[in-house]
Image (tube, rainbow, N blue to C red):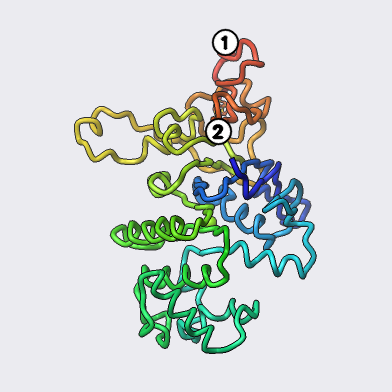
Amino acid sequence: ENKILEVKSLKKYFDMGKGELLQAVNDVSFHVNRGETFGLVGESGCGKSTIGRTILGLYKKTDGDVIFDNENVHDLNEKERFKFYRKMQMIFQDPYASLNPRSTVREVISEPMEVHKLYKTKEEVTERVYELLEEVGLNREHANRYPHEFSGGQRQRIGIARALALNPDFIIADEPISALDVSVQAQVVNLMKQLQEDKGLTFLFIAHDLSMVKQFSDRIGVMYLGNMVELTDSAELYEKPLHPYTQALLSAIPIPDPDIEEKRERIILEGELPSPINPPSGCVFRTRCPMAMEVCSQIKPVWQEVEQAHFVACHLYDETIENKNQLKKQPE
Ligand code: SF4
Ligand code: MG
């Protein structure tokens, strides 16, 4: 196992004024192996994008560590950070918003190469732009056109070409297919898979929908209200979800077979997502958890490896707490 990224007890709080803190990321730990895709999943507002931006150093951490390629990202000086961006790049959800509408495709893709002075001549840059366009399934005729002339899927390809311009090792893809038509989503995922194979890329793939990360991720971390609640292999997570929140997310994915679909029990989560400014005591999921026990409001469940390489934070699997099942379900 060859870790390229390690996130250790990462915390990111935002000061909202009046003494209020928004606990966007609370004590999250995971690692990403070189060449794999790590999927980060959860409802919007659960802290996934904040983790992505904090890993990249776009946000200052509140606490914890981000180790990339044996370097502590938040300890880098300006010059080192500049170099670090050659190794780690980000793709955004809305490719249109992230591309300057007044820049041609050529300008959009060549900008990072120029900022980092990757080539000596304009001709070399142009050659590289053509090459990148072909790598993402576009062609050189597209270079002098503007982003608005392209479909959503094509714009995401342009965004990917720009992210690839510096030959990064690691790409944070923040909901890269969420804004695309279902028919186009698979094409973009296939492109990312192909590029991963060809270039040995590592992906942190952020999505709000488990069905989206399913086909693409080697391992998956599930987030809820700033906390990671479960982490394991992609296949294991689908076959044997342990956390009640993961079970609910999975039960919401339709199964194509009508016989199975009919018999299946859908877990509907009651109640609203609590505010990350004032999260519930104990387990953050307890206000919506169908399995909640009294202990859940009193003690925060610890993050532990309950089976090999299968981590979960839930009292149902915590053997250090006795008699938890005799504790009555908390009153509403
Ligand atoms: Fe539910 Fe309690 Fe487990 Fe939290 S710790 S997920 S409230 S059973
Ligand atoms: Mg987001």
Position of residue 49 relative to residue 277, above or below, is: below
Q: Residue shown at 65%/66% (left/top)?
A: 85
Q: Residues within 10 Å of mark 1 (few under 14, many from 20)?
A: few
Task: Tally the numbered discs.
Answer: 2
Between 118 and 108, the one nearer to me in the picture: 118
Amino acid at the residue labelled 2: Thr
Q: Residues within 10 Å of mark 2 (few under 14, many from 20)?
A: many
Amino acid at the residue labelled 1: Gln
Quadrant assignment, res 317: top right
Residue underneath mark 2: 287
Q: Residue shown at 66%/16% (left/top)?
A: 320
- x, y (%) of residue 245? 49, 34
- Residue 64 placement, left or right of 152: right
Between 109 and 238, the one nearer to me in the picture: 109
Quadrant location of the C terminus in the rendered image: top right
Quadrant location of the N terminus in the rendered image: top right
Residue underneath mark 1: 326
Q: Residue shown at 49%/27% (left/top)?
A: 242
- Residue 171 placement, left or right of 142: right
Is the residue indicated by label 2 positioned so its CB lies within 8 Å of ligand 1?
Answer: no
